[in-house]
Amino acid sequence: MPKIYHVKGTRGFRPIWFCEERGLPYEIEVIDFSPEFRSKAEWRALSPTGKVPVTTDGHLTMFESGAMVDYLVERYGGGNLVPEPGAADSALCRQWCWFGESTFARPVGEISNHHRIAPEGVTVPFVLEDGWARIRLCLDTLEGALADTDYLVADTFGIADIMTGYTLALASHRSMVSDDYPNCRAYVARLSERPAYQAASAAG
């Protein structure tokens, strides 16, 4: 049974959401999110960067939420939530999974971290301008992709929606998705109605 070390609101949401969609048994261990705990040798033995989540399964220990979802798909997915391997839709699925983390999550995180670590009342305008420009570019991309479909690949819910949907929901929660993006907002609302999404939201 996979064990997911998790803190509510972090990327552990992704593997938990996948397990809930598949009805896969899993265990959650909620950890202390303080910098002091995450710098301890015991935690760094599981997560060398100190970040969350971590998943263990038997003798396997993993960090990086996207890799966890990939592993769970291969081991426990039963061919569900992913297109047929080698098909064009499979390539598009991988594209959107990577987009959700490598392209979209970066500026969302950078904007949030900039406000978190900057001295009170002090920001660097060009850093924020660049981050917001990249966020808008990602939102424009998603707005177009969701114009005539409920989900990102073949109009069928799958791991692309778990990966990118999490990032979009996070951006929405942080008031980064304006009314100028009705398709994006409707997509987040649609995802949030899924029982597995709601269970993942409550986890931890």
Image: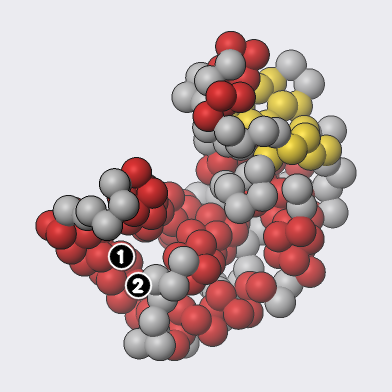
Q: Position of residue 110 (x, y in %)?
A: 32, 50
Mark drawn on residue 32: none
Q: Amino acid at mark 2?
A: Leu
Q: Amino acid at mark 1?
A: Ile
For image coordinates 76% across by 52% down, the residue present is: 203
**Does 28 sit above or below residue 175?**
above
Residue closest to the eye, 119 or 190 = 119
Residue corresponding to mark 1: 135
Query: What secondary structure is marked by label 1?
Result: helix
**Does 78 sit above or below residue 133?**
above
When asked about the image quadrant of residue 139, the answer is bottom left
Query: What secondary structure is marked by label 2?
Result: helix
For image coordinates 66% across by 43% down, the residue present is: 7
Residue placed furthest toward the front: 120
User: Is residue 131 something one can see in this rendering?
Assistant: yes
Q: Residues within 10 Å of mark 1 (few under 14, many from 20)?
A: many
When asked about the image quadrant of residue 196, the answer is bottom right
Q: Position of residue 66 (x, y in %)?
A: 53, 43
Mark drawn on residue 139: 2
Q: Horizontal placement of 25 versus 192: left or right?
A: right
